[in-house]
Amino acid sequence: MPAIDDSLIPRHATRQVAIALADTPVVMVNGPRQCGKTTLVRGFALDGRRYISLDDETALTAARDDPAGFLRPLDRATLDEVQRAPELLRAIKLSVDQDRRPGRFLLTGSADLLSLPTVSDSLAGRMEVVTLLPLSQAELHRTASRFMDQAFSGKAPEAPAAATDGRLVQRILRGGYPEMLRRADPARRRNWARDYIAAIVQRDVRDISSIERLDVLPRLLRILAQHSGQLTNFTQLGGQIGLDEKTARKYLGVVEQLFLVRRLEPWHSIRLSRLVKTPKLHFLDSGLLAALLGVTPERVAGDRTVLGVLLETFVFTEVLKLATVSERQIALYHYRDKDKNEVDIVIEDEAGGVVGLEIKASATVRPADFAGLRKLAAAAGRNFRSGVVLHDGDAVIGFGEHLFAAPLSCLWRSEPRGT
């Protein structure tokens, strides 16, 4: 699998940004560092928009010292890495209140600033946020997936002409960060991941939070990697690095803000009270998780069981990427009841429709693999749309009303982009 030049890959979020710039004063492209935000927003430079990076220390100092003066000479501008100077956001509010022309400010942020009440309140009604995550498989294949629409319609997913290509392990271990995709050597990917985490800890954490023990964050991330896909026990997580539950929650919140991990809350229904109410934890890139766990192609070849947690992370992030560019308002959850019936991912749209996804590393699917999906269907009642067991095979097979086994590649190989 050759190295990939991400600069030639169209991003699905580009259309969202263009639409938002046409009618909204401020547009923010939010996502992890090194996921392609700068490349995306530089594509809008042809309209005369000035580009300023706040990674430049001179620009950063000016923005922090005099936010209003920094903005005054700017008519339309792209401000990259705005989380480094959150003081600018209040000045941007005042500026757009005086001049509400659409598209005045295009921002990027490598931290979820909207989780801070002062930020979300200051730009409410003035800013649209577009989430950009590392490259999806649909983007790498230059396809526009119809998986979400098919799932919510209750129809069987479309099986691609070439459902499997023998590269699933490589896809999982590389993930979606452009710099990881450029590196064919697994050792080089691990080195990049190590340096990436160190840079975030040393630079970005200080911009968004006052954490006393920065030294524990790399250790915390390694521990979180070992618990990816599992129910979150903050006391247990904190105890492994000498943090109490409250501090562990705070530190986990910081790595969530930096788009490294994501809590997946449990799905609830008033029809069923025997549901576990503990969130799960997922990394937002399977390649980064593989590097933290030291999983290599050779290790997978010798013990394929190590692929399980990485596959769940891989699918979760692919579904999340589809959700961020969907025209539906979509929320993701997990399902688990007190009898230990589980569904890996529950997708709910704004109309209350529910889709369940179960992830299976093998190519063989059996009726027993649908136990959790049947429980979810009963709990959701008339809101249940479909349940899919995603597997490493090449055929779509029905297992009952609105229940299907389908190849993992249905998530990305539905339709060529532009057709």
Image (cartoon, rainbow, N blue to C red):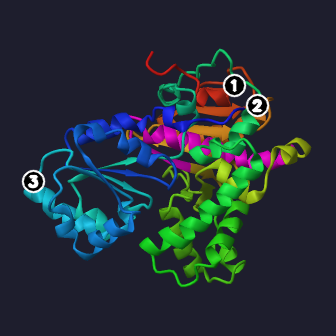
| CA distance separating discs 1 and 2 | 7 Å
The residue sitting at 44% across, 42% down in the picture is: 324
> Splitting the image into 4 quarters, where does residue 262 fall?
bottom right
Magenta stretch? 304-333
Identify the residue under disc 2: 367
Tell me which amino acid carries mark 1.
Phe
Identify the residue under disc 1: 399
Are the residues at dot 3 and dot 2 in contact (C-beta closer than 8 Å)?
no
Relative to the observer, which residue lies in front, 72 or 29? 72
Residue 315 in the magenta stretch? The answer is yes
Q: Nearer the viewer, mark 3 or mark 2?
A: 3
x and y percentages locating residue 380 in the rendered image: 52, 41
Note whether 209 is above or below 375 in the view shown. below
Are the residues at dot 1 and dot 2 in contact (C-beta closer than 8 Å)?
yes
Note whether 260 is above or below 134 in the view shown. below
Identify the residue under disc 3: 99
x and y percentages locating residue 258 in the rendered image: 50, 62
x and y percentages locating residue 382 in the rendered image: 48, 34
Tell me which amino acid carries mark 2.
Pro
Q: Is residue 66 left or right of residue 317?
A: left
Quadrant holding the C terminus: top left
SS state under label 1: loop
**Magenta region, main secondary structure:** helix
Residue 156 in the magenta stretch? The answer is no
Q: Hey, which residue is sitting farthest front in the picture? A: 58
Relative to the observer, which residue lies in front, 171 or 249? 171
> Splitting the image into 4 quarters, where does residue 84 fall?
bottom left
